[in-house]
Image: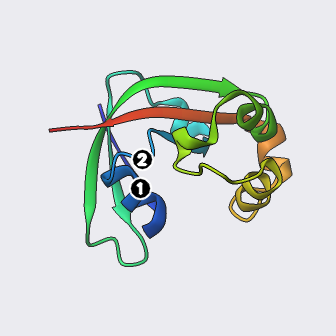
Amino acid sequence: MEHNMRLFEEPFNLILQGKKIIEIRLNDEKRQKVKIGDHIIFWKLPNCEENLKVRVSGLLHYESFEKLYKDIPFDLFGRDGKSLEWMIKGTYKIYTKEQEKRYGALGIRIELAD
């Protein structure tokens, strides 16, 4: 199965460079359909004219972003040297605590597809 998701420029480029191998998302209804072996096409914001294709190699389910961040080294997100506080603050600019409580957090382990 193939999924489409939008991604800001910096994480998009980190995936292309091989520095980001885990994408963080809310585990909402759309992400609950993602399975290992599926493909995701990431469209680079803001204009979504450029894309890249990855294969899902793992799914990491957590009840909160904080627990996810405490369990996974930041370099796998392309965020080596950042603090837990920085990671959480950035996440809450995208998702609300209410969404997190309702759906939980998802780490999607990815690899560039051919």
Left-right relation of 98 to 107: right
Residue count near mark 1 (Cα–Cα under 10 Å), binned few <14, some 14–19, many ≥20: some
The earlier-in-sequence mark between 2 and 1 is 1
Residue 26 seen in this snapshot: no
In the image, residue 44 sits, relative to residue 19, either above or below, namely: below
Q: Residue at x 33, y 71 (%)?
A: 48
Give the residue pinned by disc 2: 19
Left-right relation of 53 to 74: left
* Position in image of residue 36 (x %, y %): 39, 21
* Position in image of residue 91 (x %, y %): 71, 55
Give the residue pinned by disc 1: 14
Left-right relation of 86 to 94: right
The label shown at residue 28 is none
Secondary structure at numbered mark 1: helix
- Pick the front one: 73 or 8: 73
Q: Residue at x 80, y 39 (%)?
A: 66
- Where residue 54 sits, quadrant-wise, is top left
* Position in image of residue 15 (x %, y %): 38, 50
Tell me which amino acid carries mark 1. Answer: Leu
Residue count near mark 2 (Cα–Cα under 10 Å), binned few <14, some 14–19, many ≥20: some
Considering every residue shown, the one lying at the far left of the view is: 114
Give the image's coloring scheme: rainbow
In this rendering, the count of numbered labels is 2
Q: Residue at x 78, y 29 (%)?
A: 63
Q: CA distance from mark 2 to mark 1?
A: 5 Å
Considering every residue shown, the one lying at the far front of the view is: 81
In the image, residue 28 sits, relative to residue 57, either above or below, namely: below
Q: Residue at x 59, y 44 (%)?
A: 25
**CB atoms of marks 2 and 1 within 8 Å:** yes
